């Protein structure tokens, strides 16, 4: 009996296994970066940069081809060879989903977003209600890499990723991973800018999302302000040239699913400090650089009168810079800038610090919480920051 | 064979059986919680699942007491055995459906649903071929490692700061939470496998271990399922849970928290699938044993197992066509026949009338 | 009485006629039947040429008997004449009195000599074996760095002696059993009285004696007689060619089965952990032993799972690859013309072919063959873009892991399981691999070795020696294995 059973199973097994849908790795098109721009007539242009599977260099390709069944609102471009090993494709369609399926149709490979490193939205699009549905579609329908960083740019997002090249001898995908890791260690980009975290924050009523803000390096831009500290700027306005054509610095802050403002690099670092997610051990406060000796303790709470409070305790050692500053001076500066930051967030209706997660604890049911009109209370709540700094 | 050795063997066999029941209860709690209770109680799903811990312990204790009386009375009645077989098979079908849903949503996105379902049933049949002994010993072997690994991986999913999913504590309110608990009563059904006697004829005279061993193990399994539901609820807010409409998606740990690394996510997924599979195989073996008690002729050529597997395959094919929502709707009804199975024997003190098999 | 051809009769000539007829003499040139006068009566010695030690037979049997005076034994009752010769003339130590013709013939065919006397219906069978046999050599498949380097040979007596040199205990018992139908094979069961479980012993004995196959049995055949799961990939008994290991089996409470003509022995019952232990674990310090066991376990897991996991990741779960690795795999995979599963099968087959060829090729050629084939085939295949370099590394690592398996039978079983898991991984991803692995584990947990669970004492729990994965310090290893009898 056992033998018959085993024989039957061995015969049926191949048939069952063949229905599981595996495919060879070279039949997938691995997208490394994706950009979404608004197009005329309410359509969207989706641009992807993907692995081409070859290391040979090629000439610039053509653009502007039309998919066989496309109407006026749907277009797909021919592949552009942007750099060795990568191709750039773009498609225009009424929705992101349709554009991605159009892209799949124009190549003989299946689109695979499992290696996606960044999703770039143009600022124009991010400032509308379309951002959340787009991100949701990418995440849930195409199972994109949940760790892909969401980036907002004031430039054309498609051009942004065309300019994004690998540097220092590594591949683009690895370069982006290392870049974002390095930037988050310096606290110049928001801590929870991953795709899954941004979507969760957008859907949540207890905190708001903050994505990475980036732009092309415009060394000659008139917005380069002399005398302002470097980190206290937005990307694209840094007074320097760099091998990378794109600069990532600061945050794009959202209220719900809509972008409502930006934070500079310094403000982003302060936001990381306030939320207790600061990773840098060498902050620059004023014009002095310090080293953090012990983990910074931060406590956020809502006072009984509804005041948004932050208490920060830091243990620092001066490394370089002005030696005349006392601990009280540093504490006062932190308090000033933190209050200014929180007020800026309030003005933008963005609870990036997560005070909603504190406020919800006072309610037993979701109905009570939803009736509490927390958004109005947050907007008008007073702010108090206290800092206890010791300089050794 | 020395008496002490025979007692040791019986004790070991019962301990293994208790571990199998524990895994089945834990898997059921998690599957019921994520599948049925979560749309009702959202982030308070762990609260809904909490009463299932003492429920599973009580069910296990009751099963052991009743089993002793039945064995003293000469054996299980056919109606009880048949009912038990139906309950085991239904619970097995539910766990198998959750296994297929989870796999279909995560690991085998491109697979045909029918292939996935039949593949799962086929391997469950292969795993159940060595009878309850094989799977219960495997459950005994991993009784510490698997839960510890799952808890550690689950902890990796927690956010570094805050736990937004914990609040509001009652989720949508006391009413929906209680409704979730009521929908989860069937998760104690796997404990009924302890009604079945050990099949080896050599051990019939040896004493069974104390009741606390079985109750404790069942409670531990249910507690693990509840703990996983708590870890599940912590990272994301209730809004994220409300947005999860697909059963497979509800069974997957949310990603907004810590573990973004694909390896940790994959490890957690594989551990979940393994635990669900162990539960399903235990229940399939128990269904076979119960069916053979009801109809001893099915013992020949393992016809009982083949019949149970065929029934399971048929159920899975039906669900593939009707949609897995049907399983979510029907699953709470398992509690009714399960409760009937635990009725005391009809004669005074249950002695002398339970003679079959 | 003489027509009864089952037992001897008092007539010497009649007995010799029966023996000649049974052995095919004089046509059968190997049969030696020597008649002689021993004192007052006639006698005969029956033996097989080449099997018997001629010098021993001449000096210790024929010469002393023929040197007896003519009147010696005249007053000895006829039925006691053989006994008289044994007491007064023959100086061979191992001897038995037998009257069953079948038994006498079986002993003569095994190299013993049978002494018959006129008027006596009993023969004396003496151990005069003197056939050529291999000297004690070194183990071929169980080499160790530190420790004894002796191995068993094909002679069952030599093998028993090798064990007795190590286990010098009065409880050590040797029981001879015969297996087979017309062509009998002599086996020996060695055990420590009071330590080995009597039930297990009788089970093994009955399974061996119940065999009626009519061909010479080897240790492998005897193992097939003992096992109860013929379809299983995991062996139920442990085989060894080392006397020290066999001695450790006896100390654990196992029963050691020796087969005449085979240079390895069986230890039963066994657990799956016995199949993964090596003598090195015992001869080295406990830390080193534990470390080596962990290395071995990692090797086994790599051998079993790595190809399947690799294929499943490539075909189903590329998100698990790091970006750099994916880019490398993607670019190389685009150039390879065959599907990755076929690629993996071909490379695995090539690896196994090289291994088999290296085993069969003679002498120095064998060791060079593996290196050259691997280098040339592998390098050429990569240069020609037939296989990707990463897959080659995976297959090679998996093969190396397979070589870590100390038990040869287990390594082949694991190779088959590896193929099954590879197929599941290639066509069903990690899900199918997980289902398959769980089914295999359930099968393993349910298996028994002579009635004893194969995965005990882990599952089910059995009290006994905890030397499973960790090699504990010697002072903590006070208990025998769980399957030992009362004297644990």
Image (cartoon, coloured by chain):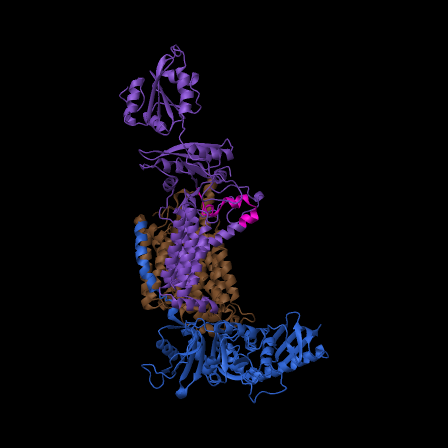
Find chain A in the image and tell me its colour: blue
Image quadrant occupied by the N terminus of chain B? top left
Disc tally is 0
Q: Is residue A254 visible?
A: yes
| Relative vertical location of residue C158 with respect to residue B353 in this rendering, above or below | above
Q: Residue A78's image quarter?
A: bottom left
Q: Residue furthest bottom?
A: A222
Which span is picked out in magenta?
A: C269-290
x, y percent for residue B103: 40, 65
Left or right of C287? Residue C127 is left
Magenta stretch: includes residue C276: yes
Q: Which chain is purple?
A: C
Left or right of C321? Residue B357 is left
Q: Which chain is brown?
A: B
Q: Residue B27's image quarter?
A: bottom left
Q: Is residue B184 visible?
A: no
Q: Nearer the viewer, residue B11 or B145?
A: B145
x, y percent for residue B174: 48, 70
């Amino acid at each position: 009996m056992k033998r018959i059973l085993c024989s039957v199973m061995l015969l049926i097994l191949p048939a069952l296994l063949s229905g599981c849908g595996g495919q060879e790795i070279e039949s997938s098109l691995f997208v490394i970066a994706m950009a979404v721009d608004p197009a005329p007539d309410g359509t969207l242009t989706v641009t992807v940069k993907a692995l081409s599977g070859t290391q040979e260099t090629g000439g610039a390709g053509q653009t502007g081809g039309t998919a066989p069944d496309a109407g006026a609102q749907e277009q797909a471009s021919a592949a552009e060879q942007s750099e060795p090993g990568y191709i750039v494709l773009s498609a225009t369609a009424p929705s992101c989903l349709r554009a991605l399926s159009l892209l799949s149709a124009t190549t003989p490979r299946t689109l695979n977003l499992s290696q996606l490193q960044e999703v770039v939205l143009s600022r124009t699009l991010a400032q509308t209600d379309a951002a959340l549905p787009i991100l949701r579609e990418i995440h849930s329908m195409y199972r994109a890499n949940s760790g892909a960083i969401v980036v907002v740019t004031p430039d054309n997002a498609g051009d942004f990723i065309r300019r994004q090249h690998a540097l220092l001898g590594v591949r683009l995908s690895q370069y982006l991973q290392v870049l974002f890791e390095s930037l988050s260690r310096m606290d110049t980009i928001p801590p929870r800018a991953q795709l899954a975290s941004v979507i969760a924050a957008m859907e949540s009523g207890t905190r708001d999302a903050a994505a990475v803000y980036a732009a092309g390096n415009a060394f000659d831009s008139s917005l380069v302000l002399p005398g302002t500290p470097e980190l206290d700027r937005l990307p694209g306005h840094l007074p320097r040239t760099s091998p990378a054509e794109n600069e990532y610095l600061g945050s794009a802050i959202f209220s719900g699913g809509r972008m409502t403002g930006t934070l500079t690099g310094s403000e982003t670092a302060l936001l990381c400090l306030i939320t207790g997610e600061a990773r840098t051990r060498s902050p620059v406060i004023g014009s002095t650089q310090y080293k953090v000796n012990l983990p910074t303790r931060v406590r956020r709470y809502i006072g009984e009168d509804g005041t948004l409070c932050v208490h920060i305790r830091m243990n620092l050692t001066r490394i370089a810079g002005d030696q005349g500053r006392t601990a009280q001076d540093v504490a006062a500066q932190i308090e000033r800038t933190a209050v200014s930051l929180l007020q800026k967030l309030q003005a933008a209706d963005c609870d990036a610090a997560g005070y909603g997660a504190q406020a919800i604890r006072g309610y037993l049911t979701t109905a009570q919480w939803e009736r509490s009109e927390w958004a109005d209370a947050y907007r008008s709540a007073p702010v108090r920051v206290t800092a206890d700094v010791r300089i050794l | 064979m020395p008496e002490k050795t025979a007692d040791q063997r019986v004790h070991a066999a019962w301990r293994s059986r208790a571990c199998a029941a524990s895994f089945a209860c834990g898997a059921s709690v998690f599957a019921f919680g994520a599948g049925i209770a979560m749309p009702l109680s959202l982030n308070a799903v762990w609260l809904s699942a909490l009463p299932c811990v003492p429920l599973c312990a009580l069910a296990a204790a009751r099963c052991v007491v009743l089993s002793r009386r039945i064995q003293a009375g000469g054996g299980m009645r056919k109606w009880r055995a048949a009912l038990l077989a139906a309950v085991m098979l239904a619970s097995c079908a539910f766990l198998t459906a959750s296994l297929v849903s989870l796999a279909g949503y995560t690991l085998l996105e491109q697979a045909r649903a029918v292939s996935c379902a039949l593949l799962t049933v086929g391997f469950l049949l292969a795993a159940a071929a060595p009878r309850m002994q094989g799977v219960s010993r495997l459950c005994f072997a991993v009784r510490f490692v698997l839960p510890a690994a799952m808890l550690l991986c689950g902890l990796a999913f927690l956010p570094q700061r805050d736990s937004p999913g914990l609040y509001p504590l009652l989720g949508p309110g006391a009413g929906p939470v209680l409704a979730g608990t009521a929908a989860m009563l069937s998760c104690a059904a796997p404990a009924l496998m302890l009604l079945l006697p050990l099949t080896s004829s050599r051990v019939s005279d040896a004493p069974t271990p104390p009741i606390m061993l079985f109750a404790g193990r069942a409670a531990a399994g249910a507690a693990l399922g509840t703990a996983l539901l708590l870890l599940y609820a912590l990272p994301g807010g209730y809004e994220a849970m409300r947005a999860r409409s697909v059963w497979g998606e509800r069974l997957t740990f949310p990603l907004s928290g810590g573990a973004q690394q694909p390896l940790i996510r994959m490890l957690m997924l594989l551990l979940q699938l393994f635990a669900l599979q162990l539960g399903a195989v235990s229940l399939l073996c128990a269904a076979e044993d119960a069916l053979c008690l009801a109809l001893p002729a099915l013992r020949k050529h393992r016809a009982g197992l083949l019949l149970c597997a065929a029934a399971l395959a048929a159920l899975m094919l039906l669900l593939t066509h009707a949609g897995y929502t049907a399983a979510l709707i029907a699953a709470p009804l398992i509690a009714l026949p399960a409760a009937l199975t635990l009725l005391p024997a009809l004669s005074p003190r249950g002695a002398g009338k339970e003679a079959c098999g | 009485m003489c027509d009864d051809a089952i037992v001897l009769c008092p007539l010497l000539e009649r007995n010799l006629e029966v023996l000649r007829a049974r052995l095919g003499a004089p046509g059968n040139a190997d049969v030696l039947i020597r008649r002689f006068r021993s004192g007052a009566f006639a006698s005969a010695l029956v033996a097989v040429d080449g099997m018997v030690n001629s010098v021993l037979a001449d000096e210790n049997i024929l010469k002393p008997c023929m040197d007896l005076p003519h009147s010696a034994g005249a007053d000895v009752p006829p039925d006691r004449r053989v006994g008289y010769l044994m007491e007064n003339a023959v100086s061979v130590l191992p001897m038995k009195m037998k009257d069953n013709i079948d038994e006498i013939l079986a002993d003569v065919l095994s190299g013993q000599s049978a002494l018959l006397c006129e008027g006596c219906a009993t023969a004396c069978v003496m151990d005069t074996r003197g056939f050529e046999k291999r000297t004690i050599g070194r183990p071929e498949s169980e080499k160790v760095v530190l420790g004894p380097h002796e191995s068993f040979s094909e002679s069952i007596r030599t093998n028993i002696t090798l064990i007795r040199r190590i286990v010098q205990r009065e409880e050590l018992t040797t029981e001879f059993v015969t297996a087979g139908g017309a062509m009998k094979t002599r086996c020996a069961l060695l055990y420590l009285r009071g330590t080995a479980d009597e039930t297990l012993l009788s089970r093994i004995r009955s399974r061996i004696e119940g065999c009626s196959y009519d061909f010479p049995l080897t240790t492998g055949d005897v193992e097939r007689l003992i096992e109860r799961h013929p379809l299983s990939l995991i062996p139920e008994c442990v085989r060894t060619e080392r006397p020290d290991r066999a001695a450790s089996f006896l100390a654990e409470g196992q029963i050691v089965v020796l087969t005449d003509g085979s240079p390895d022995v069986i230890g039963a019952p066994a657990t799956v952990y016995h199949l993964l232990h090596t003598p090195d674990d015992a001869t080295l310090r406990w830390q080193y032993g534990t470390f080596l066991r962990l290395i071995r376990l990692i090797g086994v897991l790599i051998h079993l799972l790595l190809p399947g996991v690799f294929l499943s990741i490539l075909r189903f779960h590329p998100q698990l690859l790091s970006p750099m690795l994916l880019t490398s795999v993607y670019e190389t995979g685009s150039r390879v013309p065959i599907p990755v599963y076929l690629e993996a099968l071909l490379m695995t087959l090539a690896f196994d072919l090289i291994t088999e060829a290296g085993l069969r090729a003679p002498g120095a050629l064998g060791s060079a063959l593996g290196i050259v084939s691997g280098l040339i085939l592998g390098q050429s295949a990569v240069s020609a873009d037939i296989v990707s370099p990463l897959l080659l590394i995976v297959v090679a690592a998996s093969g190396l892991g397979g070589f870590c398996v100390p038990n040869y039978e287990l390594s082949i079983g694991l190779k088959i399981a590896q193929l099954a898991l590879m197929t599941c991984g290639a066509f069903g991803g990690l899900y199918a691999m997980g289902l398959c692995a769980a089914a295999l584990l359930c099968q393993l947990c349910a298996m028994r070795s002579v009635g004893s669970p194969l995965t005990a004492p882990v599952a089910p729990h059995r009290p006994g020696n905890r030397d499973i994965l960790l090699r504990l310090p010697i002072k903590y290893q006070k208990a025998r294995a769980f399957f030992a009898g009362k004297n644990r």
